[in-house]
Image (cartoon, grey):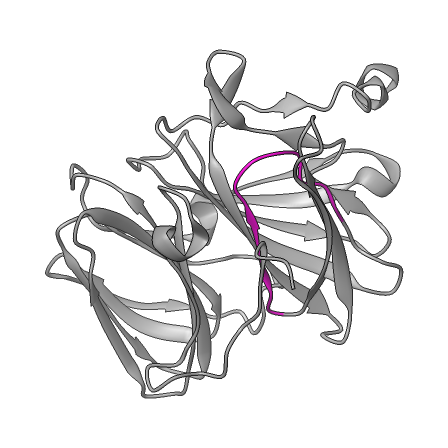
């Protein structure tokens, strides 16, 4: 199996099913975990020299961070529903969570110094937009875009309808060449509706020294260390993915594959 495709494990004693670190991914910035918690189960972490964005994928939880109690957040029954709630925890702090219902959470991390306060990111603070046309249409929820406070993290949810493509035309962000392109590592956490489906994602570079096409099942993570990375949802299956990006500078500037950029010009 490709090293870029990470399968979930059975929940451990803490409920964790994914534990992706910079060391395990072979890169520098992005960390990503997923937990499936039973009602009443608690979770507590110290952030160290990393900031964290805890995304409520489903369910409700009582949360706190940096000695602040933020009360109960969440409420949707699946990530395919709108209105995500999230918690931001700065570096050198502690965050905690107690599941009020069965819930699933994603913990997104990246290097930071602890310059910002802890806060809850409410649904009304999440910018929503629709990108593309025709079968390139997808729906974006900007949980932690570059216009909102964070030191390294960029976090976004995307819903790709059945039979549609996303991250398309293919683009990349693997060179520190601003203002034209930024260097950002990226993870895709894939969910399918119905869950028996799969998504197809290709990760490739111009020289094709990296060129892999992956079939991602419900709950899989695809690692994008470099290269273009389009993804498609087969007919009959709606695709959700949660993107986490981070790099040396917190800006998203991508470069389109010249072979396919004509689509944007004709549109």
Image location of residue 75, percent across then percent down: 47, 70
Q: Quadrant of the N terminus?
A: bottom right
Would you say the magenta stretch is mainly helix, strand or loop?
Answer: loop
Q: Quadrant of the C terminus?
A: top right
Task: Please identify the residue farthest to the left as the structure is shown.
Answer: 67
Count the marks. Answer: 0
Q: Is residue 256 left or right of residue 244?
A: right
Image location of residue 10, percent across then percent down: 49, 83
Q: Residue at x 45, y 36 (%)?
A: 145
Q: Nearer the viewer, residue 213 or 180?
A: 213
Q: Is residue 200 magenta?
A: no
Q: Is residue 63 left or right of residue 106?
A: left
Q: Residue at x 77, y 33 (%)?
A: 132
Specify the segment rendered in magenta: 219-231
Looking at the image, residue 76 lies above or below residue 244: below
Looking at the image, residue 72 lies above or below residue 266: below
Image location of residue 84, percent across then percent down: 49, 57
């Amino acid at each position: 199996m490709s090293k870029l495709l990470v399968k979930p494990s059975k929940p451990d004693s803490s409920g964790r099913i994914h534990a992706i670190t910079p060391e395990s991914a072979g890169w520098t910035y992005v960390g990503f975990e997923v937990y499936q918690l039973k009602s009443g189960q608690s979770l507590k972490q110290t952030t160290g020299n990393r900031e964290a964005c805890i995304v409520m994928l489903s369910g409700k939880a009582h949360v706190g961070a940096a000695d602040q109690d933020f009360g109960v957040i969440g409420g949707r029954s699946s990530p395919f529903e709108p209105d995500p709630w999230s918690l931001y925890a700065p570096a050198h702090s502690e965050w905690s969570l107690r599941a009020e219902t069965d819930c699933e959470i994603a913990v997104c991390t990246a290097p930071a110094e602890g310059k910002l306060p802890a806060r809850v990111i409410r649904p009304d603070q999440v910018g929503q937009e629709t990108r593309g046309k025709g079968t390139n249409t997808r729906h974006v929820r900007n949980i932690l875009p570059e216009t909102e406070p964070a030191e390294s993290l960029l976090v976004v949810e995307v819903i790709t309808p059945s039979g549609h493509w996303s991250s398309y035309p293919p683009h990349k962000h693997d060179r520190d060449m601003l203002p034209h392109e930024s260097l950002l590592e990226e993870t895709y956490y894939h969910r399918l509706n119905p869950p028996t489906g799969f998504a197809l994602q290709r990760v490739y570079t111009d020289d094709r020294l990296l060129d892999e096409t992956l079939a991602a099942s419900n709950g899989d993570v695809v690692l994008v260390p470099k290269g273009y990375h389009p993804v498609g949802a087969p007919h009959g299956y709606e695709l959700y993915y949660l993107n986490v990006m981070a790099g040396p500078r917190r800006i998203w500037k991508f470069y389109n594959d010249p072979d396919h950029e004509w689509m944007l010009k004709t549109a």
